[in-house]
Each structure stands twice: as C-alpha cells, then as structure tokens.
Image (cartoon, rainbow, N blue to C red):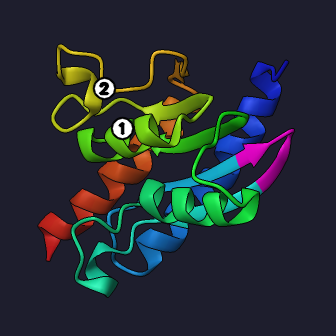
Amino acid sequence: MIGAVDDAHFMRMALREAERAFAADEVPIGCVITARGQVIARGHNLTERLNDVTAHAEMQAITAAAEHVGGKYLHDCTLYVTVEPCVMCAGALHWAHIGRIVFGARDAKAGYQRIEKAVLHPKTEVTGGVLEGECAELMKRFFRKKRAL
C-alpha cells in the first residue's frame, strides 16, 4: 500500500515537471505515473510549444506509460498530478483504466469534479490535496507573472 509519505515523494517529482513547464512559459502542471513504486512516465504541459490544446501533462504521461507497459490499460498504475485533471484528461484516464489518481491543487473552474456525472473509471481510486499549498502556489505565481506582462 502506498502511504502519504510516498504520495508526497511522487508529488514532489510531479512538481519538478510543473517547474519545467513554468520555465518554458507553459501552464505549470506536471505529473508522473508510477507502477509498483517506480516512475514509468513523466509529463508536463506542452500546449504552447506544440500548439496543441490536447498536449496536457496527463496526456503526455499516459502515452509514455502505455508505451512502457506495452498496452493501453494502466490498471496497476498511479498518476500523480499537481492540479486536478480537467474533464478531457479525466476521460482519457477513464479509458486507460488508471488504478489511482493523486492530485495536488483542486481546480474549481476546469477540474473534472465540477461535472456531476462520474467521469473516471468506477474502479479508479482518487486522493486529492497532496502538497496542495505548493501546487496551488506554483499556479498562482505563474498567473501573477502573466498578469504583470
């Protein structure tokens, strides 16, 4: 069983990915996917660089993880992401049958939880609020910087 200490450890890795996005002037969301306690995929937003609205951190990591496991299903994997997934990413995670999602900051405007119907696969476990303050602060810092330009 993965504990809170492990969740924080992997969320810090996701935060490092988010910092990479921040440095590239992308919305600073990052993630890692683990299997059996080992990181098998990483991702951060690339929407500006790729000029692709679907190039979210989660989408990048899902593709890499599926390649790593040699199949489209990620039953035994955990996604650690700095911000609650949007509806698009939650849908992709549903189809990937991700085993568990751990997110940092909640997203009241664009997060999947604002939708009343369940978006995630019914067997997916969700833990929210891991390193929430740090994850939220990175987003706030990014948008403060944008508004100052």
Residue 127 relative to residue 50: left or right: right
Element type at marker 1?
helix
Q: Which quadrant is home to the C terminus?
A: bottom left
Q: Which quadrant is home to the N terminus?
A: top right
Q: Quadrant of residue 25?
A: bottom left
Residue nearer the viewer, 109 or 50: 50
Q: Main secondary structure of the magenta part?
A: strand
Image coordinates of residue 36 in percent, x first then y, are 86, 38
Residue 61 relative to residue 92: left or right: right
Residue nearer the viewer, 30 or 96: 96
- Estimate how packed mark 2 is, as few (under 14), some (14 to 19) or many (20 or more) residues with alpha carbons within 10 Å: some
Q: Which residue is mark 1?
A: 90
Residue 66 relative to residue 121: left or right: right
Q: Quadrant of residue 71?
A: bottom right
The boundaries of the magenta stretch are: 34-39
Image coordinates of residue 51 in percent, x first then y, are 23, 83
Question: Is residue 14 covered in magenta?
Answer: no
Image coordinates of residue 72 in percent, x first then y, are 57, 52
- Estimate how packed mark 1 is, as few (under 14), some (14 to 19) or many (20 or more) residues with alpha carbons within 10 Å: many
Q: Quadrant of residue 37?
A: top right
The residue under label 1 is which amino acid type? Ala
Residue 25 relative to residue 81: left or right: left
What number is the disc on residue 119?
2
Can the viewer see residue 93? Answer: yes
The residue under label 2 is which amino acid type? Val
